[in-house]
Amino acid sequence: MKKINFLAYVMCALMVMGCSTQAGTGGLLGGGGGAVLGGIIGQLIGKDTKSTVIGAAIGTAVGATAGTLIGKHMDKVKAKAQAVENAQVSEITDQNGLTAVKVAFDGGILFDTGKYALKNNTKTALTKFANMLKSEPQLYIDIQGHTDNTGSDRVNDPLSQNRAQAVANYLVNCGVPASQFQNVSGFGSHQPIADNSTAAGRAQNRRVEVYMYASQAMIDAANAGTLQ
């Protein structure tokens, strides 16, 4: 495992932000919210890494019927996520062959250029997204930050980490259990989804992605036939 970037850790630890529906700012830094900063800070991924694994390391086999139940449930999750402003939602397949949901947020909508403090006018959408996640306690969540290739890795790597962490912190401060977050990672400019030689492509590459996938508890419920 690569070492956590110390600068990214310190900068994240200094962040103070609050949910627009919660009293006080910086509440995440007290109480149980510190788990996000300490336990799931994630790792900076170097340019040699082309992808990351999405999906729980499950301890039981998943039957065809259980897989179908999870797929139907994820269809409901997808529909809920599509109601969130500025969310680009799609279904993917996780490492277990199960349906998962990816939500991408345009980095330019969430943050000012070169910054990782969330814009105030984006918090309403993220609060709505948090409420959706709170209704799905059996989901696991990964958050990934990405930049375009403007600037150096020295700037982009910690910036992408801090932006992913800012979204995670805000969601936890809105009441999403920290235990649902499995990985919060920054990938800098190393995983572009569009052509960095064009302004439109760079805009697509500046993004934060949220992955929602089945936890072991959800898989167990599906195997037992109780997942709705």
Image: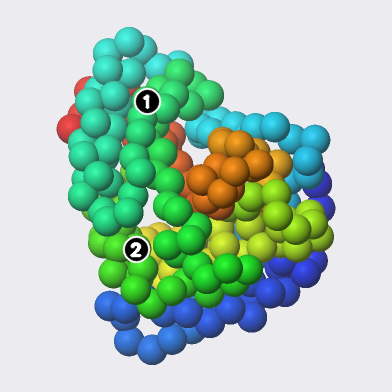
Residue type beneath disc 2: Leu
Q: Which is closer to the viewer, label 2 or label 1?
A: 2
Q: CA distance from mark 2 to mark 1?
A: 23 Å
Q: Circle 1 sits on which residue?
A: 99
Q: Taking the image as drawn, is residue 139 in sight?
A: no
Q: Quadrant of residue 97?
A: top left
Residue 193 pos. (x, y %): 56, 36
Residue under the image location 26 percent in, 54 percent down: 84
Q: Position of residue 225 (x, y in %)?
A: 22, 23
Front-lying residue, 40 or 45: 45
- Tell me where residue 118 appears, x and y as whole percent: 47, 72
For residue 226, what is the image quadrant? Answer: top left
Colour mapping used in the image: rainbow
Using the image, determine if residue 200 lies above or below residue 86: above
Give the percent coordinates (x, y) of residue 48.
80, 35
In the image, farthest residue toward the top? 64
Which residue extends farthest bottom? 24
Q: Which residue position holds label 2? A: 126
Q: Nearer the viewer, residue 188 or 133?
A: 188
Q: Above or below — where is 52 with respect to 188?
A: above
User: What amino acid is labelled 1 in the image?
Assistant: Thr
Q: Is residue 227 left or right of residue 205?
A: left
Instruction: Count numbered badges in the picture.
Output: 2
Label disc, if present, on residue 147 of the rendered structure: none
